[in-house]
Amino acid sequence: MKQHTRTLRDLDVSSLGLGCMGMSAFYGSADESEGIRTIQRALELGVNFLDTAQIYGPLTNESLVGRAVKGHRDAYVIATKFNLRMDDAVPGDPSTVGRQDGSAAHVRSSIEGSLTRLGTDYVDLYYQHRVDPNVPIEETVGALAELVAEGKVRHIGLSEASAETIRRAHAVHPVTAVQTEYSLWSRDPEAEILPTCRELGIGFVPYSPLGRGFLAGRFSSPEELDKDDFRRSGPRFTGDNLTANLKLAAKVKEIAAEKEVTPAQLAIAWVLAQGDDLVPIPGTKRRTYLEQNVGALDVELTADDLARIDAEVPEAAGQRYDERGMSAVNK
């Protein structure tokens, strides 16, 4: 297994990260003990870049990550995110989460909760999970800059921000990374987000590089998922969109078979091949899938392979989220 590292602006991380969300939320039932073992196994495999957020659970995923890294905190690079108010949030109960708030006061209060749950005195990378349209980005980033000065945050990031917002934020304080969905079937960032990040020297962190598991062939119908799995009602996994996207996934499987790799490995390798400034964070809650995903680091895609993929694998049918979800991205 190759040992790879990459740099997000000035933050050194493993070339592949681990998205921890599914260990606690949104993807149906989860086994916390297996999640903890998966995080610990990641480090053994050379994967030290962990991605979590306050909303995952809510609040429970940060606590899980904190338990998993205890005693080895400094060996990991931990990224977490803030956005919605958690004043009255009950761990594990999404209905108790409050409104969006990008104010300076909320930035300062949010970090304290994250530090406590993670069992640490600093966060390596702190993202605004979604841009608050009612608060100037300059105020939010100004508060983040203060946290950097205090040593509570080492690097700042934005998630699902527009090119204009990225520029405005970066003018206040250097942005280390921008996180946005990006994969074989979600190539929207190629138009403006990626070029802006590259112009400014900002790293890019693609989440859902496996199309929420669909490109990996881990399910072919929403009926195969747990009843509380949010993908069951996702626009890309229902109706005519599902029919079209099954053909897309079949093509990924076909090309992967010819390369003698798994569909997941092909999909991750494609993202890795888009530039050394990209660090994908495929999520999983099981060691077996983690080990398969890490195998993508050894997959070599030639120029002919990449050209074929571009020609034969279209973007997905359907939006990434429902209308409410889409209204919060690219702000």
Image (cartoon, grey):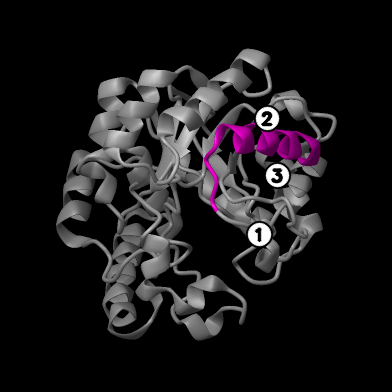
The answer to whether residue 92 is above or below residue 149 is: below
Amino acid type, label 1: Val
Q: Earlier in the sequence, mark 2 or mark 3?
A: 3
Residue range highlighted in magenta: 100-117
Mark 1 and mark 3: Cα distance apart in space:
26 Å
Q: Position of residue 28 (x, y in %)?
A: 64, 71
Residue 110 forms part of the magenta stretch: yes
User: How many dots with numbers?
Assistant: 3
Q: Are marks 2 and 1 in contact (CB under 8 Å)?
A: no
- Could you tell me what secondary structure mostly forms the magenta stretch? helix
> How many neighbours does mark 3 have within 10 angstroms: few (below 14), some (14-19), or many (20 or more)?
many
Residue 5 visible, this orientation:
no
Residue at image point 59% right, 43% down: 82
Residue placed under numbered mark 3 in the picture? 39
In this rendered view, identify the residue nearer to me: 111 or 56: 111
Q: Is residue 113 left or right of residue 82?
A: right
Q: Earlier in the sequence, mark 2 or mark 1?
A: 2
Residue at image point 47% right, 29% down: 139
- Callout 3: SS: helix
Q: Position of residue 179 (x, y in %)?
A: 43, 41
Amino acid type, label 3: Ile
